[in-house]
Image (tube, rainbow, N blue to C red):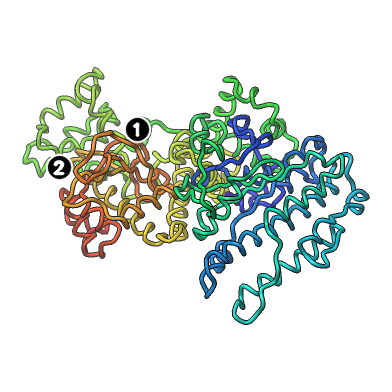
Amino acid sequence: MQIDASLLAKTRAEEHEADVWGEFFIPPYFDKLGLSTATKSVYITGKRGCGKTMLLKYFDYHTAFSRRRDHIPVGEVDHVGIYWRVDTQFCSSLNHRGIDELEWSVVFESYFGLVIAVELLHAIDAIAQSKFEGFDSADLASLAFPNAADYLDDAPSSLDGLRRHLESLRRRFTTWVSNVKAMERPVLPPGRDFLLSLIANLQERPVLATLALFVYVDEVENLVPYQRQVLNAFLKHSQRPLIVSFTSKEHPSDNQTSGPESINATHDYRHIDLDKYLEASKPTTFFAEVFLGNVDIAAKRYDSPRLEMVRSQDRLVERQRSEYQKEVIGIMRKRFPETTDRQIAANAMQNATLREILMRRVTKALKDRSTKLTADDFMFDGAAPEALVTLPALLNRETLLPENVQAELKRYSTERMGMFESSWVHNNLFGSILELYRPFARECPLYSGFDTLATMANTNLRNFLILCYKTLEVADLRDEPDGPYSADTQCRAAYDASEQLIKEIRTFGRFGEQLRVFVLRLGSIFRALQASPAMSEPEQNQFTINSGGRPLEAEEHAFIGEALRFGILVEQQETKSKSGVGLDIVDYQLNPIYAPYFQISYRRKRKLEISVEQFHILILGNETDYRNLARGLARQLSDADALQLGLML
């Protein structure tokens, strides 16, 4: 199958053109959004990779009135969307510099209105160039905006002339911002009034009489506080024909407007949490649809039955049927096959290198226990592989006599009964496989299989696509272009994807590099705990802060907030009771997408309990303090293992 690999490299909505017609797949919760028929603002939240930017691009006029769209309903002008992503660098320059904040508020409101006015005129042009009936190029040429002259002297009344005039005014304003002390500020029209006056001129045309403008401000949390308050005022007073809505990674607490009022979710807007919508809609099938649909696009099968289905708003019910979902999941499981833990153990025992590693570890454990038994007494013909793999952990536990472990092994291998059957295999096999494959660094088969990829993605569409696309890249290099993809190929791709996403953390907001170091430190500690010979607490990949001599400080709270906002940590409420540090007891899981890099479990299992002071060292401590902390937490490790895991100076 020949595919355009460059198309599969686009895992972020920002990498797509403004017009995403044919590239947007209707999510299963689409009908619940009600954006096209909204009568008041919405506040859309969702973490990176949830699909909110692609959703907004779908509702933006570039897509709604795409030239690629064969039929555009008359009612489409009832919702003319404008997606505006905040230019944080420019907006941050609209602050201080000898100008009072109150004056900046007036300036920013006018600037916002100017930007949206230009986009509105572009949108009307797009409508005329599209297949929308009743408004064509001739109608466009005859449009007039007499109201504009009431705000700007010499403002042309034609659409093209007014657009050029406003774009020139924006350039002059930008120049003034760079030279506030050396230039006179250009006169800008008042934002809301100016936009409403332009809309009123447009509505004089019968075909545009119901036109309503919906502005979606993306990443509103990155604005300067006073700018947020200006836009909060826009949101509070939104109603057709001008409705301003927001998106951000989380629902912020800044509800103040530029006036005496505040905004609230009950009266002023509807909160849409895309993460919750996605989680409730069983995202695994949708993730599979997006991947398979993108593969069809990359292979230039633009009219495939699958694409026709996932692009259509009218076929959502059909996609919810269990037969259809089983078919989609079946295709993905065939392409990304999973090997069971027991089969991985059996395969490992057929590998001479892995078998030798296991023999050495069993021998060392028996030597440390001063028993007369040897590794050969355990590695007998017919010994169950899934039990053999767990032996190093069991034999290192002081509470278990080697002779009893041997007896249980024989019983399990012949009768499938005893401790191995009831708990030992279940509790220890996954962690034991991770430890067995540790010398292989990048290729542990536990990180393979469609369901595993979906679990590691943790309801994050972008992370899931990166895992899949990396698999295609590695498969192409290994001459496996069409699948099914081997476990070795999948797990190597999972490692590469995990490594890429860890490097990306440094770009995450004001704590970027600090967050990256934190992930490296925390992941290394979990890996060290995984390598503990007795493996008494296998699969630790989460922590809780439940002790200490003081409560968390403001900076530490802020750090946790950023880690949650960017999806580095996954929060799980454990109990409503208060802990000794003044917080509800909360478990924080390291995002499972990072598990392959550290060779730790991606499953939510056991947790590490740490103090406030230990957490402080994790996020702010120097390297010596961190290594001392890590060595203390992983105290059962030998010096050789600690050195290999980077925990010794």
Crowd around label 2: few <14 · some 14–19 · many ≥20 (10 Å): many
Residue situated in front as seen by the camera: 81 or 333: 81
User: Considering the image in quadrants, where does the C terminus appear?
Assistant: bottom left
| Amino acid type, mark 2 | Ala
- Residue at 67% across, 77% down: 184
| Amino acid type, mark 1 | Ala
Residue 542 appears left or right of 104: left
Q: Secondary structure at mark 2?
A: helix
Residue situated in front as seen by the camera: 374 or 244: 244
Label count reads 2
Marking on residue 346: 1
Residue situated in front as seen by the camera: 82 or 458: 82
Q: Secondary structure at mark 1?
A: helix
First-in-chain label (1 vs 2): 1
Give the Cα distance between marks 1 and 2: 22 Å
- Residue at 69% across, 55% down: 116
Residue situated in front as seen by the camera: 620 or 194: 194
